[in-house]
Amino acid sequence: MICVCVSSAAMDAGDPVEKARRNWVRAGHPDESGFTVLVSMLRSYGILVRELETALRPVGVTLSRLEVLLLLSFSRDRRLPTMRLGDLLMIRGSSATYLVDKLADQGLVERHADPADRRVSIVALTDAGLRRLDEGVRALADAGFGPIGAMGEDDRRALADRLAVLRGAGAPAIGAAAE
């Protein structure tokens, strides 16, 4: 790995977050640190998604579609109702349906009517979907999960702890055995 050393003043001069912070302060808006954290998170999320989408492109799935495959693989029998997927993804039902449609077109999931309630659509992970999921997981890991790969283990754990606070959750038990 090549490390390029740049002074913090030089980095800050072109940093969009720092520019936004200065403009915020200049405009006299309140809560500079809250705004700076917000903009930092939004920009970081954008960079993260862009890099992960690039890593997944050769696999033939988007990050959102891979997340659906992951959620299905984590469920007891590799199937979930479409509306439950939407809840877990924190998206509207129509967006969940769109993702499922695209995955079904690729043969990665199948849609079945719930025998107890035909209005409910159950999404099931196919063997092809499971193979694609494995390819996607390998691609993300090989890419170091984007910019996360540049962070040391202690920094990753600290960031996971801080993000848990924002979610109103306890710190993740990284390194603990799965139950």
Image: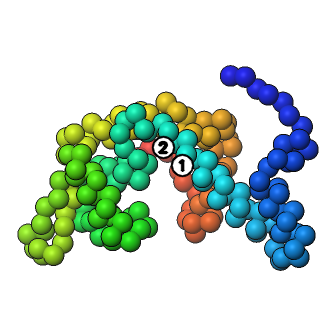
Residue depicted at 76% across the width and 26% down the height: 3
Residue depicted at 57% across the width and 66% down the height: 167
Residues under numbered marks 2 and 1 in contact, where contact means CB atoms less than 8 Å apart: yes
Amino acid type, residue under disc 1 in the picture: Val
Q: Secondary structure at mark 2?
A: helix
Q: Which residue has dot 1 on it?
A: 49
Amino acid type, residue under disc 2 in the picture: Glu
The answer to whether residue 125 of the structure is visible from this angle is no
Q: Is residue 61 above or below residue 32?
A: above
Q: Residues within 10 Å of mark 1 (few under 14, many from 20)?
A: some
Q: Is residue 163 above or below residue 91?
A: above
**Horizontal side of residue 36 vs 129, given as left or right:** right
**Horizontal side of residue 167 vs 131, given as left or right:** right
Q: Secondary structure at mark 1?
A: helix
Q: Is residue 87 above or below residue 164?
A: below
Q: Which residue has dot 2 on it?
A: 53
Q: Quadrant of the N terminus?
A: top right
Q: Residues within 10 Å of mark 2 (few under 14, many from 20)?
A: some
**Horizontal side of residue 131 vs 150, given as left or right:** left
Using the rendered view, name the quadrant where residue 71 is placed: bottom left
| Inter-mark Cα distance, 2 to 1 | 6 Å
Residue depicted at 44% across the width and 44% down the height: 177
Q: Tell me where residue 26 appears, x and y as whole percent.
A: 90, 70
Q: Is residue 64 above or below residue 88?
A: above
Q: Tell me where residue 11 appears, x and y as whole percent.
A: 84, 43
Residue depicted at 61% across the width and 47% down the height: 47
Q: Tell me where residue 27 appears, x and y as whole percent.
A: 87, 74
Using the rendered view, name the quadrant where residue 145 is placed: top right
The outermost residue toward the top is: 1
Q: Tell me where residue 151 appears, x and y as whole percent.
A: 66, 38
